[in-house]
Image (tube, helix red, strand yellow):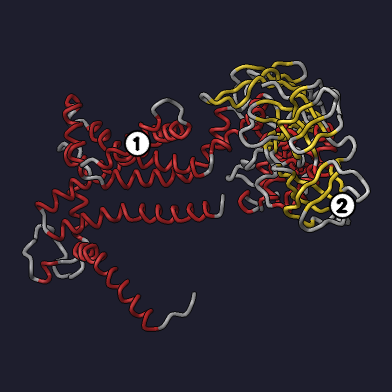
Amino acid sequence: MTGSLSIENLSKHYGATAALQRVSHAFAPGRVTAILGPSGSGKSTALGIIAGLLAPDVGRVFLDGADLTRVPPEKRGFGVVFQNYALFPHLTVVENVEFGLRVRGVGKAERRRRAGEMLDLARIPHLAERRVHQVSGGEQQRVAVARALAIRPRVLLMDEPLSALDARLRDDLRAELARLLRELALTTVYVTHDQAEAMSLGHALIVMNRGRIEQAGTAEEIYRAPASPFVAGFIGAANVFPDAEKLSDGAVRLPFATFPANGTSPPGPCWAMLRPEAFEVAREDEPADFAARVESAFFLGAHMRVQLRAGDRPLTAEFPAGAVLPSSGSLRLRVRPGALYIRANPEP
Amino acid sequence: MRDRPLLLSVALGSVSALLLVVVLAPVLVVIAGSFLNTAFLGISSERWVAGGESELVTFKWFGYVLNLYRPQLTFGVQLALWNVALCLLIGVPGGCALVRRAFPGCGILEDLLLLPLSIPGITVSIGLLQAYSMIRGKWGLLLAGQLLYTLPFMVRSVTSTLRAHDHAALERAAHSLGAGFWRTWWLVTLPNLRHALVVGSLLVFAVSFGEFNVSFLLNTPLYQGFPTALYATYTTNSFQVSSAATTLFLLVIVPVLLVIQALGGRESTKIEQGA
């Protein structure tokens, strides 16, 4: 299958700051890989290097076995959707979309036809003759996607394509973009800091932090088995305990209680995670794992989010909306079987 | 617009009108003077432009001035056009390079470029005379001196447009779509600079044509700009002749300024619209 994009050992420094440190990954051909990370995690730098707009200090970029590292962006044939779209203000919508074809010497009639197809695909054929500044933000986003796709790119790169839009519009466009990308079956790298966007658009996820890949996998894999405390906190909500310890009898000691083991890590210091949905209220006749003080509770529709304090540790818990909870005071809590996740401390 | 009390409107209108009169009066007097036949009024014995003695309004001063200062007028326009050409040639690539920080010291250079505008023209001119005494008396030196004043206007015009539009992003987009350096320059950078180049050229033309300091000190009898001629006419000729010369000067410069004003206004509304 064509569209096998991979990066090998990419590093990039800005002065003394390391934006990217020895990053390698083979992207799934024909699928969408979302690179997720906070700002400054190196995700946009990685995308810039793949696009050819930034040069790595070391490392290489391959497509279908060919080394593209020294190939300038205009010769890569990658479609790029930029964060602020970077539409050409002196051209109309359709002229923007056909720009790549014009540069490739495609004749006027043919490029009008293909640009028209792209505008249909992006559902904005009625805007063809408008100037760029005469269309709305969401429409500009569609123009940017149509323009990137018009060159029939070998790889599609998207840098926070929805972040400039307001929340409602973002949700609508996200669903539409997900449909479009599924239909295109194009190797796509989608950079975002929004986990909902990453999880709904990406077939595969890469979580980046401080210039490194913390974990790569499917959304579910990463949610169930985060590789580091950072990933645990970044993908979904989590109560993370960096100072847990696995005892020699297999039990796990957290600061406020000790629990039966889960996982097979060797005894010693480790980190542990409890998702908010890991807790249940113990019945009167049941033994409880620990007691916690209720600090606040919010009704969130399908469930209640409760801020707890166990010993000196704040905890976030979620209970089904029907659960009967005291609005203050103390709760006797159990941790669902198998819900405590532990992992050996990451290498320093 | 909201309704204003009548009294306030009248007061505001009067103040505005008064200010307008104060500002415009000298100009209007000069313009009127250039058409006035003082000999007809009997307050001047000036007779060395023949004809029209029996009319109050006359155009004869223009004929006289045009004849007298044609070389200066022609040379002034030529010099201004040379300025425009060289500013386009140097200022446009230069402005792009400055915005991209293409080489070390770009920031300092950009600041230095504005320096001549804040140094007295006489200092610049004497400096130029001393540094380049071998080409003293050549109009090239006059052009070089003027360029110090005109180039900043073109460069400023270019850099502010490039910065306002995040041009680097547009160029990256063009590269990603397959356009190399020159295609990007031709298809993206230049079209987006078109407006800046028109305004910049007009500004350069106006500054060069109206520049007096450097032109006065670096001129030679053969190569004099029009303001130098104006100076000469004020010191040696009658009120009517100098008025006519001034009116000629305004005739060249005012349309240019009006176009700059109109274009400048259009550009700022475009930027406000987020173009």
How many numbered marks are there?
A: 2
**Looking at numbered disc 1 in the image, what kind of residue is underneath it?**
Asp
Q: Please, is residue B118 above or below residue A100 in the view? A: below
Q: Residue furthest right?
A: A285
What residue do we see at 17% from left, 29% from top? B136
Relative side of B53 to A98, left or right: left
Q: In the image, residue A190 lies at what x, y percent?
A: 73, 35
Question: Dividing the image into 4 quarters, which one contains the C terminus of chain A?
Answer: top right
Which subunit holds the residue at mark 2?
A
Question: Dividing the image into 4 quarters, which one contains the N terminus of chain A?
Answer: top right
Taking depth in this image into account, of A192 and B14 the one nearest to the observer is A192
Q: Please, is residue A343 above or below residue A172 in the view? A: above
Taking depth in this image into account, of A66 and B131 the one nearest to the observer is A66
Circle 1 sits in a helix, a strand or a loop, which is it?
helix
Q: In the image, residue B182 lies at what x, y percent?
A: 55, 28
**Looking at numbered disc 2 in the image, what kind of residue is underneath it?**
Pro
Q: Residue furthest bottom?
A: B6
Residue contact at pointers 2 and 1, CB within 8 angstroms = no
* Quadrant of the rendered image containing residue A200: top right
Q: Residue furthest left?
A: B45
Relative side of B250 to A256, left or right: left
Q: In the image, residue A205 lies at what x, y percent?
A: 77, 32
Taking depth in this image into account, of B128 and A116 the one nearest to the observer is B128
Q: Please, is residue B258 above or below residue B225 in the view? A: below
Task: Tell me the distance, in whole angstroms, between the alpha carbons under discs 2 and 1.
Answer: 65 Å
Q: In the image, residue B144 lies at what x, y percent?
A: 27, 33
Residue that carries the numbered disc 2 in the rendered image: A320
Eye-nearest disc, 2 or 1: 2
Residue that carries the numbered disc 1 in the rendered image: B111
